[in-house]
Image (cartoon, rainbow, N blue to C red):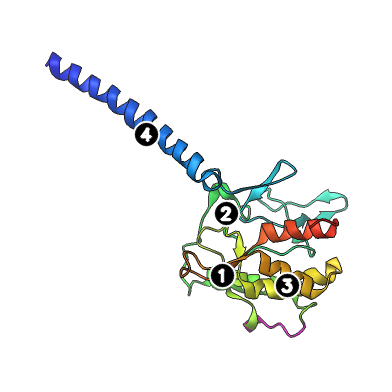
């Protein structure tokens, strides 16, 4: 009995050291050496300040202010309007939107009434923002990723079709040529994963940061 207890105790200590300390340290070390960007969350910094991640979507919006008071909803979350000088990320299912600490999908079926209402609301919001700059835009031509949320709720990319539509607004508000904005979209468009998985996407944060640099006279 005593021998079994000693053997068990030794086993616990050894396994804890090997699997609980040594193994995580080795894997972390390999990750930092071989894949430092991925291991650290694909962080994006500007002048040494962390501004986001290539892997996490962001809101590019201004908080609504009435009578000098910032507006919040019934849950205390800020009420915002899209900032027209920026490309907008796809709709987010998290609360608040693009909350990396609470990635979530609605899990509601395509025929669920709540899903239909959410998609319809997203389409109307998109039309309200983009149609003044693209008069021919209709509900039927709104890209899927502008109407529906992603599986994670924090997708950092939008489709090239979505970006091409938004380019008209961004170019107009920033007083840039459409060709300038289209070229920047091309620069920050990545191909399919492994060359065959998914569709090409445009990283919204990187694109918006590049636009800010251009507006400030940078490159």
Q: CA distance from mark 4 to mark 1?
A: 36 Å
Q: Find numbered disc 1 in the image and state the secondary structure of the residue it sits on.
A: loop
Q: Position of residue 84 (x, y in %)?
A: 79, 65
Give whichever of discs 2 and 4 has the lower sequence position. 4
Give whichever of discs 2 and 3 has the lower sequence position. 2
Q: Main secondary structure of the magenta part?
A: loop
**Residue for point 68% across, 57% down:** 206
Please check the rendered image and state whether residue 41 is part of the magenta-colored stretch, yes or no. no
The circle drawn on residue 182 is 3
Tag 4 residue = 23
Tag 1 residue = 200
Q: Please state which of the two labelled residues, at mark 2 or mark 1, is closer to the viewer.
A: 1
Residue 180: name its quadrant.
bottom right
**Residue for point 14% across, 14% down:** 2
- Determine whether, in the image, residue 195 is placed left or right of residue 138: left
Q: Which residues are magenta?
A: 135-140
- Determine whether, in the image, residue 212 is placed left or right of residue 196: right
Q: CA distance from mark 2 to mark 4?
A: 26 Å
* Residues at discs 2 and 4 in contact (Cβ within 8 Å): no
Give whichever of discs 4 and 1 has the lower sequence position. 4
- Determine whether, in the image, residue 204 is placed left or right of residue 8: right
Residue 208: name its quadrant.
bottom right
Crowdedness of circle 3 by 10 Å Cα count: few (<14), some, many (20+)? some
Tag 2 residue = 55
Confirm whether residue 80 shows in the render: no
Crowdedness of circle 4 by 10 Å Cα count: few (<14), some, many (20+)? few
- State whether residue 20 is above or below residue 37: above
């Amino acid at each position: 009995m005593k021998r079994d207890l000693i053997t068990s105790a030794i086993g616990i200590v050894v396994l804890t050291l090997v699997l609980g300390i040594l193994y995580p340290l080795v894997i972390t070390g390999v990750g930092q050496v071989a894949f430092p960007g991925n291991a650290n969350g694909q962080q994006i910094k500007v002048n040494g300040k962390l501004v986001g991640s290539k892997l996490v979507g962001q809101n590019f919006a201004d908080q609504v202010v009435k009578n000098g008071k910032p507006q919040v909803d019934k849950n205390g979350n800020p009420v915002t309007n899209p900032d027209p000088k920026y490309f907008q990320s796809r709709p987010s299912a998290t609360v608040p939107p693009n909350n990396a600490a609470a990635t979530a999908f609605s899990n509601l079926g395509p025929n669920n009434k709540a899903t239909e209402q959410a998609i319809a609301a997203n389409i109307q919001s998109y039309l309200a923002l983009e149609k003044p700059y693209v008069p021919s835009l209709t509900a039927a031509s709104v890209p899927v990723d502008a109407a529906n949320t992603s599986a994670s709720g924090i997708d950092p990319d939008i489709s090239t079709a979505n970006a091409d539509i938004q380019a008209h607004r961004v170019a107009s508000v920033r007083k840039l040529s459409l060709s300038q904005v289209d070229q920047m979209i091309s620069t920050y468009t990545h191909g399919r994963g492994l060359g065959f998985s998914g569709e090409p996407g445009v990283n919204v944060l990187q694109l918006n940061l590049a636009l800010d640099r251009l507006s400030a006279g940078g490159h």
